[in-house]
Image (spheres, grey):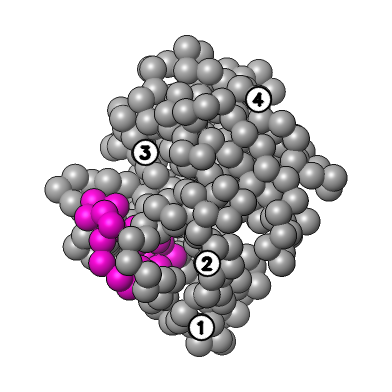
Amino acid sequence: MKRLAVLTVLILAAATPSATAQAGAVHRPTSYVVSTTPGENLEGIAVTPGGTMYVTSVATGAVYRGTTRSSRLSLFLPAGSDGRTAATGIHLDRWGRVLVAGASTSKLFLYDARGRLLDVRKASDGSFLNDFTIAGDAVYVTDSAHNQIWRAPLTRDGLGELEPWITRDRIQPTPYFLNGIVTDGRVLLVGEQGQDVTYRIDLRTRRVTVLDVPNGILSGDGYLLEGRRLYAVYNAGGGKYVTRLAILNDDLTAATLVADSGPGATGATPTTIARDHGRLLWVNSQLDLAPGTPPYTVTVVPGLR
């Protein structure tokens, strides 16, 4: 297993030499201070190809922004602004707009690059909008309270209304905590942390199956999908968190685990990951120790690219 993991990571790294070389040409810190304000709990992260980083706080709704070339981020969207008292998933769309999942606010927010609110859409009361992914002209959002998936149109003109797309009764085994979600444009892969499974959902037929992982467990909080490489931040138990790398088959019905990262720091509770050229970054949320202790940080995932 260890030999396979090392060999696989070396092969994957060798397959993308230009990205690694480009990333190595610019100095980038290995740790970032997102906030020193007591009471924050970081959660979501997005990094653009140009190195702009966005990080959310599930405790306050604040959103921070910076660059991967500087070790400190600054406030982008103040806590509580626009009714955004909590924030989890964050991504940018193809037009450079910033979408933020509002967690227990039951809302999905759309901002322009300057931080101006463009649209806000609400799911049903009591929803916990956790993470989301964009496929074509729509955004798909996990609801960790009702354990269903919401869908909203997303076009150049803005964000449409949120509507239930897959309800809990249509998912087997029955989910108890839907969380991370990614897509290749054909299917959704959705993490379920209550039972440690990953669902595969066909975007055309809405058929739900369970991703086959014959050599271990693959479920997680934050997911990252790159071609057939699937990364998941996994709670390995006993306070140990790692990022798992799995290789998917062509139709994304099965995955083979090939490597784990090194563990996060004690008490860090990493949640979500993002790609920054030849390395991975994860959010040290301190959720297991909430509200944790400042500074609240983002760091490089150890031992995995």
* Amino acid marked by disc 4: Glu
The CA distance from mark 2 to mark 3 is 27 Å
Question: Residue drawn 47% across and 18% down?
Answer: 168
Could you say which disc has been placed on residue 106 in the image?
A: none
Q: Of marks 1 and 3, which one's residue comes earlier in the chain?
A: 1
Q: Tell me, for residue 70, which label it has, or none.
A: 1
Whole-percent x and y of residue 106?
53, 35
Q: Nearer the viewer, mark 3 or mark 4?
A: 4
- Would you name the residue on which mark 3 appears? 219
Q: Is residue 150 visible?
A: yes
The label nearer to you, 2 versus 3, is: 2
Q: Answer with the quarter of the image where residue 218 lies.
A: top left
Residue at 37% x, 61% y is 40
Along the line of sight, which residue is nearer the eye, 205 or 269?
Answer: 269
Residue hosting label 2: 64
Q: Secondary structure at mark 4?
A: strand
Q: Which residues are magenta?
A: 281-305
Graded by Cα atoms within 10 Å as few (under 14), some (14 to 19) or many (20 or more), the crowding at tag 1 reads some
Give the residue number, with chain letter if any, for mark 4: 163
Q: Amino acid at mark 1?
A: Ser
Q: In this orientation, which residue lies closer to the viewer: 285 or 63?
A: 63
Q: Residue at x 39, y 17 (%)?
A: 174
